[in-house]
Image: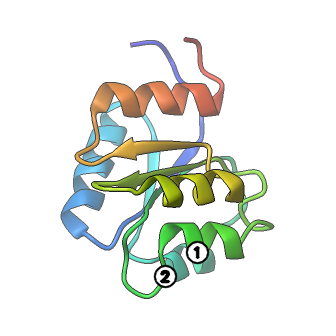
C-alpha cells in the first residue's frame, strides 16, 4: 500500500453503521478519523486542520450539498468527497459547482476510497 499524506478524515453520515465501518477501515490504513452524525455536529467540532471530509448526501435536516453550499468558508481548505447510494445528475452538478472534489457510491469501494484520498491528500499514485 502506497503511503498517503497525513490528514484527519472527518466522516459525516447519519447512519452509525456506515460511520463505524469507514472508521474501522480507515484506521487500518493509518488515518485519524473523526465521526459526526450530522453536518451541524461537524461544523461545531471542526478545528480547521488538514484532512478530508467524507460527507453523506442524504441526511435529515440538511443534505450534503446544502451544507457545502452554506459553509464554503469553513470548507475552504478541506476537500470534500460526497457519498451516496443514489445521486441524481442534477445534484452531482450542483455539488461540483459548490466545490465538492469527488463522489463515492455507497456501498463505498475500498480501493476507490483510498485512490480518492491519495489524490486529494497528495500521496503518491
Of 115 and 92, which appears nearest the observer?
A: 92
Query: Residue at point 64% right, 47% down?
Result: 79
- Residue 5 appears in view: no
Q: Which mark is residue 37?
A: none
Q: Which mark is residue 66?
A: 1
Specify few, some or many for label 1: CA neighbours under 10 Å numbering under 14, 14-19, or 20 or more. Answer: some
- Residue 58 % position (x, y): 37, 70
Q: Is residue 53 left or right of residue 78?
A: left
| Crowd class of label 2 (few under 14; some 14 to 19; many from 20; radius 10 Å) | few
Q: Is residue 28 left or right of residue 33?
A: left
Q: Is residue 81 left or right of residue 99?
A: left
For the point 35% across and 40% down, the residue is 27
Q: x%, y% of residue 124?
A: 59, 13
Reply above or below: 10 against 16.
above
Residue 111 or 70: which is nearer the viewer?
Answer: 70
Q: CA distance from mark 2 to mark 1?
A: 6 Å
Q: Quadrant of residue 37?
A: bottom left
- Contact flag, marks 2 and 1 (Cβ < 8 Å): yes
Relative to 22, say whether 57 is above or below.
below
Confirm whether residue 74 shows in the render: yes
Asked if residue 122 is positioned above or below residue 72 in the image, the reply reads above
Q: Position of residue 26 (x, y in %)?
A: 36, 40
Query: Looking at the rendering, in which quadrant would you find the C terminus?
Result: top right
Q: Which residue is mark 2?
A: 62
- Give the position of the N terminus as an image quadrant: top left
Give the quadrant of residue 44.
bottom right
Amino acid at each position: 500500500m502506497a503511503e498517503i499524506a497525513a490528514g484527519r478524515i472527518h466522516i459525516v453520515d447519519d447512519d452509525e453503521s456506515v460511520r463505524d465501518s469507514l472508521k474501522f477501515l480507515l484506521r487500518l490504513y493509518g488515518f485519524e478519523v473523526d465521526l459526526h452524525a450530522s453536518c451541524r455536529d461537524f461544523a461545531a467540532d471542526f478545528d480547521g486542520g488538514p484532512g478530508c471530509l467524507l460527507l453523506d448526501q442524504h441526511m435529515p435536516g440538511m443534505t450534503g450539498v446544502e451544507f457545502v453550499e452554506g459553509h464554503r468558508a469553513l470548507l475552504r481548505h478541506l476537500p470534500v468527497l460526497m457519498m451516496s447510494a443514489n445521486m441524481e445528475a442534477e445534484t452531482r452538478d450542483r455539488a461540483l459547482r459548490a466545490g465538492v472534489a469527488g463522489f463515492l457510491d455507497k456501498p463505498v469501494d475500498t480501493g476507490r476510497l483510498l485512490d480518492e484520498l491519495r489524490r486529494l491528500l497528495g500521496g503518491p499514485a
